[in-house]
Each structure stands twice: as structure tokens, then as C-alpha cells.
Amino acid sequence: MKTFTLATAASSLISTVLAAPSLQARDDITPITVKGNAFFKGDERFYIRGLDYQPGGSSDLADPITDVKGCKRDIPKFKELGVNTIRVYSVDNSKDHDECMNALADAGIYLVLDVNTPKYSINRSKPKESYNDVYLQYIFATVDKFAKYKNTLAFFSGNEVINDGPSSSAAPYVKAVTRDLRQYIRSRGYRKIPVGYSAADVESNRLQMAEYMNCGTEDQRSDFFAFNDYSWCDPSSFTKSGWDKKVEKFSHYGLPLFLSEYGCNTNKRDFGEVHALYSEKMTPVYSGGLVYEYSQESSNYGLVKIDGGNVKELDDFSALAKAFKNTPNPEGDGGYNKTAGGNPCPAKNAPSWDVDSGDELPAIPEPAKKYMKEGAGKGKGFSGSGSQNAGTQSTGTAEPGSASVPSDGASSSGSGSGSSSSESGSSGAAAGLKVPPMSFAPLFIGMVTVLSGFFGASLILV
Ligand SMILES: *[C@@H]1O[C@H](CO)[C@@H](O)[C@H](O)[C@H]1NC(C)=O
Ligand SMILES: *[C@@H]1O[C@H](CO)[C@@H](O)[C@H](O)[C@H]1NC(C)=O
């Protein structure tokens, strides 16, 4: 694409003028990184001003990124709205995505991608069976397809797998998948694309799930956490919606946090929550969110109505565009937490949180280990036969730290050693465990005190 653009530019003055912005935009797209509990674009704090984008509905098996016509039809609308990020719920990993991804990059728009599809996902009613090598091959192949784009902002390792108290027992599998994806990204030498989970709007275990995804050794923790929140129904306010309480609840949370879906449609929407979300009342803890959703589907959350090549803007479209326009980001860094870091694992409290804080995570299924070294190979795409009853399951549990991958010379030999970072400082707990190699960053050492309770508990169960 770049060569083509340059050639065009050389051919005439007019095309130079036309081509230059596109070339510059392509080069300009700066990958998003995580610092403390926030996202950054270079040295600047980055807030997700986003939109959920799945024309046809999120349960419909369609890939809006391979639909180049639709993608190019909708990008001007994204710009009109003022969004910098879209979330897509499913993609076909056997297909090519260059054209739409590059067009999005040219428009300065990032992608948050769900790596799962309905056929290739963890099934909350049978998590053990659905966590298998065929499943992992699929999602790793999806990572292979999207890691090369600088505007891939993040991957969702799972979406609403846990949707009430009892289904929280599937959380160790969600966490294992997150661990495996992060290990895959490091093992394959890709850019550090953030990986995290998108939680359902469940008040009873929201905090536990967030804490659970941020406890344990570095290799077990997530890069961010996101949840859906439909509690602000216009007309409302920071206090009336209860968002003040949530900010308080999460005020010491050590990962970037954002809303993976928001925009209650009970009453007429004026998106009053946009003002709150990007105000200094929230930005020390939140990094924005994604409005549900771009297209009008049966659930009636759409901003536009798509009819073939035509897109009709609905009332909510101008309401959201106006809300974004009238809401600048806070000055400076928005008060983010520079240190951040992990937290202890939440205590079991069934039925709302049914995970023992001492339980180890399931080990990666044996046949999937080879993908770390060899790559996942071709994706089966939408025509694949699915993974929920396929392949080889996990046997046993993984030792904390076992998914570490040496990187940048900062760590040397964590991989495969089965070591844990915790025992270096706690002599009693260290008995029977291997001495850790010098493979852990200073952050790890700092976490020893916080985590020692967790490891103490886990050792009893070993
Ligand atoms: C999950 O498993 C249950 C029980 O086997 C099954 O009825 C359901 O269809 C599965 N869900 C999906 C999305 O395949
Ligand atoms: C920053 O994050 C750390 C780790 O989660 C936490 O312990 C600390 O309280 C946070 N600081 C503030 C000011 O919230």
C-alpha cells in the first residue's frame, strides 16, 4: 500500500496532495501501550472513545473487517461520531483483513478484538471440556492475523463467560486462556498487545472477577480489565447511576479499566454518561469505554440503520456525536495511578464467587504447547467445525510462573522452569519448590509480600 501511495504521489501534484495525509496517517498510527493503570499513545494518556461494531448483531457469525465495502462505508460515520476505537465480536481467522485494518489506521481508529467465536469459545456450562488444544489453535491463529496491525489495540480473551454467581466457577478457565494468549504473544515475539477479559454487567461478583484477573504471578495476570455497564439510564447523574460507588470500589485497582459496553436505552438517550466517563472524577480509575452499538439490531441499541449500502443516522447518532464533541479529555494524564500492579486473590464467597483463592490454574493442554514455539498455523475460520467438544483437555494444574517467557533480556529463563517468584522471600513456603532463576523483573519482587498469603494457601493444596 505504501509503495502504491508513493508512486501515486510522484505522478502528479493533485495525487500528492491526496496521498500525503493517508501516508502520514499510516505511519502515524502509534501502538497503544499500558503504563500503570492506564493506556498510552506514546507519552500521551489514551482514552477509549469507542463503539461496539458488529452489523448483524453479536451472535450473528459475520466478520465486519473482511467486509471491505461495509467497513469503508462506516469509517466516515466513525469519524463523524468522533470515536477512536471500535470493538468487533468475531472475525474469520482464515480471511485477509488488510484493507479494512489499513483504512481504519488511516482514520486513526483502533480495534479491540474478541478472539472467540460462538463455535470456538469457552462454554460456561462445560469449561473443562471446551478448554482444549483445538480451541487454543483457533484463537492463537486469530492473534497471528491481527498482531501485525499497529492499530490492534487489545484482545478480549473472553466475553461474558461468567454471567451470574454460580458460573464464576468457570473463571479459572477464563484466566488460563488469558495467560495462554499472553504467553503466545510473548513467545511469538509480537508487540505487547494487551490482553484482558470483558465481563458481563453482574454486580454481585464484578469486583471479585476484576481482582481475580489481576492476582497471582505476572504471567497469570491480565493487561487490563473491562466490564459492561448499563446502569446509567438517562436522565441520570454520577451519583444517581451509582457510578460514584464503582469508582470508589475500583479506586485502588491496578490495571487499566474500561467499559466494554455501555449505553442504557430504557429512556431516550442523551449519553450524559460520556461527560462523566471522561471527567477527572473517573479518569484516575477508568480509561473510557465502548458504546453499544453502531448498527440497529433487534435489541434496539443502534446509532444507525444499515440498509445495504445505505446508512441512516438515527437520533442516538447525533446525541452521541454531540456528547463526544462537548467532552474533551482531562488535561495532563487524568490522574492515573503510575505504580499500579497486582492484588491478592479474592476470597471464595459462594454462590456469588465460587473460586477458591488457593486453587492453581489449569495447565495448558499438552498438544497446544507446541504452538508457542512453532506458531499456530492456519486458522479454520467460520467454516471450521468448532472446538467445544474437540481436542485434548487440560490435565493437572500449572505452577505459578510457568507461562513466563524471557523477553528483552530482562528475564532469562522463566519458561518451563516451573518456578514461582514468591518463595525467594518466604523461607517456610519455599520448601519443596525449586529456587527461582533470576528471571523476574523488580515488580515481581515487590509483589512478594502481597502475594505470600496466596501462595501460602496454594501450597497447602499441592
Ligand atoms: C454449551 O454447552 C451446553 C451443554 O452441553 C450446550 O447446550 C450449549 O449449546 C453450548 N453452547 C454453545 C455456544 O455451543
Ligand atoms: C495504585 O495502585 C496500587 C496497586 O493496585 C494500589 O495499591 C494503590 O493504592 C494505588 N494508588 C492509589 C492512589 O489509588
Image: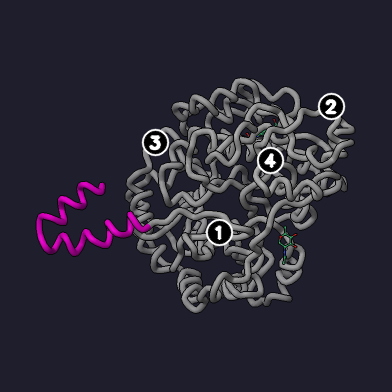
Q: Is residue 206 left or right of residue 76?
A: right
Q: Residue at x 54, y 33 (%)?
A: 187
**To which residue does mark 1 refer?**
39
Q: CA distance from mark 3 to mark 4?
A: 31 Å
Mark sitting earlier along the chain (4/2): 4
Q: CA distance from mark 2 to mark 3?
A: 49 Å
- Number of the front mark, 3 or 1: 1
**To which residue does mark 2 refer?**
432
Q: Nearer the viewer, residue 387 or 450?
A: 450
Say which element carries label 2: loop
Say which element carries label 1: strand
Rendered image: mark on residue 95: 3
Q: Nearer the viewer, residue 71 or 113?
A: 113
Q: Is residue 130 left or right of residue 59?
A: right
- Please state the horizontal and vertical placement of residue 185, each as a whole percent of the image: 53, 38
Which residues make up the magenta segment?
A: 1-28
Mark sitting earlier along the chain (3/1): 1
